[in-house]
Image: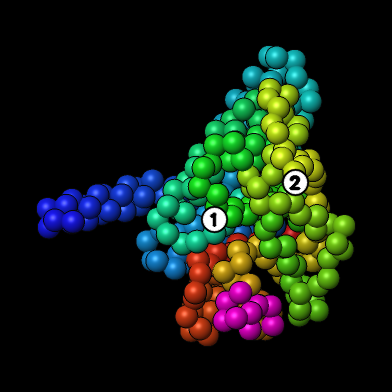
Amino acid sequence: MTEYEDRGLLDELQNFQELAKALKPSPGEIPRLAEIDIGGLSIPLKELVGGDHIIYIDFNQRYDMARRIRDAEKRNRPDVIEKLRFCQHRAGILLADVSGHRITDALIAAMLHQAFLLGVYYELDRFGEITTKLFEHINQRFYRTTSVRKYLTMLYGEISEAGRFRFISAGHPRPMVYSREYGRFVEISEKRLVSYPPVGMFPSNTTVDEEVDPGTLGYKKPYTVNEIDLLAEGDVLFLYTDGLSEHARGEYFPRVLEGRLADTGDLSATRICEFLKEDLTRYAAPEDDISFVIIKKTAA
């Protein structure tokens, strides 16, 4: 390869890097809910972009819910009106992890970001809420169109003002609940932690517009929704990627993390995230992208 070709390739790589940085989507405004405090952050291994991604859905900030309710009234859709009103008192969080931490992995996370947010518009119009149908379609699109087979896990959940968390998981690490009363993570029934294969690994068999040959491995089972509760003031629902659960070869999570949460009782969710970022990077140098979200039950 000539020096001219070397410079051309370097320029293309730099241009691609700048493009990836420009396309890196914002997670959106952190949701605001009565009696619920939310915070989160991502720590890319490569400092600029990575394969982890967070999306916040504050229905009242992202969407004109009052107008949507009026439109549903004009269409005589009481079922949609009811669901839209429920959405006004809950918030959504999507946490995704593309295997790897290169620029190309960040682009795949950006693809998920755009597909999800576009789908939300149609879900709210048609159903008044985000349903499992959206994730069946996303899974199908990634199965059919992503030629680069990357390991993509995802968790999407919605927290209500009452502290109930309903979610689906596609190969993602399970949520953890830290009890302020007991000073530790509490056990959650396996029946409330049903998970499915990573996004795009198997085809869905729920879309009516197309038939897909499932090959020798078959179809993915239809998504179902899990529910868990934050019952007491100070309890913390902890969402995370495997960069955290495998941090320091698994020494930090959950044992050390549990102790750190015990030291943060009076802090806001955002301050807990900042505290944990400092603590875990001081404990050991990260070897993967790390992301987590704190959902804390506050006083009534």
Quadrant containing the C terminus in the rendered view: bottom right
Magenta-tinted stretch = 246-255
The secondary structure type at the circle numbered 1 is strand
Q: Which residue is mark 1?
A: 98
Q: Which of the image's four quarters has the N terminus? A: bottom left
Whether residues under marks 2 and 1 lie with C-beta atoms below 8 angstroms apart, the answer is: no
Magenta stretch encompasses residue 155: no
Q: Is residue 92 visible?
A: no
Q: Residue at x 79, y 25 (%)?
A: 79
N-terminal label among 2 and 1: 1
Instruction: Name the amino acid, label 2.
Output: Leu
Residue 132 locus on image (x, y percent): 73, 38
The number of numbered discs placed on residues in the rendered structure image is 2
Please say if 27 is above or below 144: below
Would you identify the image quadrant in which residue 233 lies? bottom right
- Say if 18 sits above or below 207 in the image: below
Q: Report the disc number at residue 34.
A: none
Per the image, is 247 magenta? yes
- Tell me the residue that label 2 is attached to: 217
Q: Position of residue 67 (x, y in %)?
A: 60, 25
* Disc number lying in front (2 or 1): 2
